[in-house]
Every structure is written in C-alpha cells, then in structure tokens.
Amino acid sequence: MKIANLNVSFKGFYFTDKYGDTLTRAQATQKIFSRVNNIFIDMGLFFVHNVGYIPSHHIRSIVYKLAGVKLGKGSVIHTGCKFFAPTGVEIGNDSVIGYRAFLDGRGKLKIGNHVDVASEVMVYNSEHDMNDPKFEAKIESVEIEDYVFIGPRAIILPGVRIGYGAIVAAGCVVTKNVPNFAVVGGVPGKVIGERKNKNPNYILGRPRLFQ
C-alpha cells in the first residue's frame, strides 16, 4: 500500500521521492518540512499579491517592506507586481517599477537608483538547468545599475548585469551582460545602439496616483 510518498509493507514503512527512490527518515522529514514551509510562503505571497492591487502607493510600500523588500527613498511599485521571495529584492532610491512587473527574489535581485522599469517586465534569477538529469533549478543573481530603462514586456534572465545608463528595448530578452550606456533589443538581446547622454542626473517623475 502506498499513501503519497509513504510506503507500507509487512516489513514496516519507508519513504520514497517522486522518482521512487528510497529516502532515509531524515531526508523524508526534511522534505515534509520543506513542503509545509512552502505552503506558508505561498500563503504569504498570495496576501502580498492581493495587496498589490490596492490603489495606494503608501499602503503597498508598507506591506512590501514588511514582506522583506528593500525599497529605497522615493521609489514606487505600481499595481499588480508579483514576487518570488520578496526578501531577495533590493530597490534603490527614486526608482519606478511598472504595472504587473515580476521580480524574482530567490537569488539576489539588486535594482539601483533612478531605474525605470516599464509595465509587465519580468526579471528572473532562477531557472531550470536543462542539462541536469533531474531538471533541477539553478540560481544566479541579477544586478541592474543606476539610470537604466527597461521597456515594456522585456525579460531579464538569471546571471545578468545591466550596466549603468543602459536601455533595454520593449520585448527584449536579455540573456547576457549589458555594457554601460548600451541600447539592447531583440530575442536574444543584442547591442543595437548607444545612449548619447553619458552623464544622466535626472529624477524620475511622480507615479500615477491610483496605479
């Protein structure tokens, strides 16, 4: 008889993983603890994500900070933003995160000052290793330097550093490091130009009040 990963026989009981491999009791206990812990994490994220639709930057910022997001002075996150592990997300001063962005905090995600992230941008720092026999996930940090602009629906993949003052075009998929002041576009992202202003010192505008 088998109940989930618990197997019962005349010789006693033992645990197996999803591949059917036998686990020690210590390994099984660790997996059970991890699964229960993930349930509580998902419940917390469900709450945070629902708060993300409240039309108040002040309320959302308070909840995001309580959830572990490091949010700098004057920075705002528009409605509909979703996270994996908010504690891994760090955002500098005067940065704007657009509507329905996705910020992955399973590894370190550092966003600098005066960074403009447009709507529905997705930033990942964890992905499955396609060459791993069990298709396990790997984690790599992502860093976005100061004065970067990321266009709508761009995707930033794990292990990427986007250099100071760089521009990522709408819909671009960034798979490797972006040089300072470079303009990248396409799938996968390639350098298509260079930003002329090498000394940006602007302050981003006020966010939409109810967005």
Image (cartoon, rainbow, N blue to C red):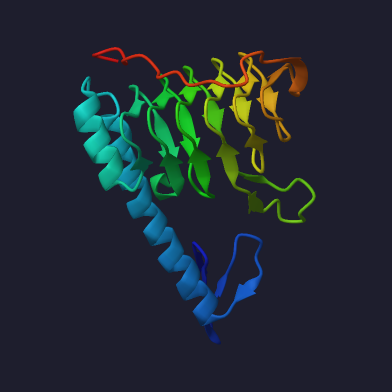
- Is 135 located above or below residue 164 in the figure? below
User: Where does the image place residue 158, in percent across and percent down from the top left?
Assistant: 64, 41
Give the residue displayed 21% in from the left and 23% down from the top.
56
x then y, percent, for residue 43:
31, 46
Question: For this view, does 95 lie left or right of residue 125?
Answer: left
Residue 96, compared with residue 111, is above or below; it is above
Outermost residue, bottom side: 11
Give the image quarter of residue 191. Answer: top right
Picture residue at 66% right of the left edge, 13% below the top = 196
Looking at the image, residue 29 lies above or below residue 19: below
- 101 or 182, nearer to the observer: 182
Does 13 sit above or below residue 112? Answer: below
Q: Please say whether residue 14 is visible from this viewpoint.
A: no
From the viewer's perspective, is 132 left or right of 197?
right
Picture coordinates of residue 36 (x, y %)? 38, 60
Residue 181 position, x and y percent, is 66, 23
Q: Quadrant of residue 171?
A: top right
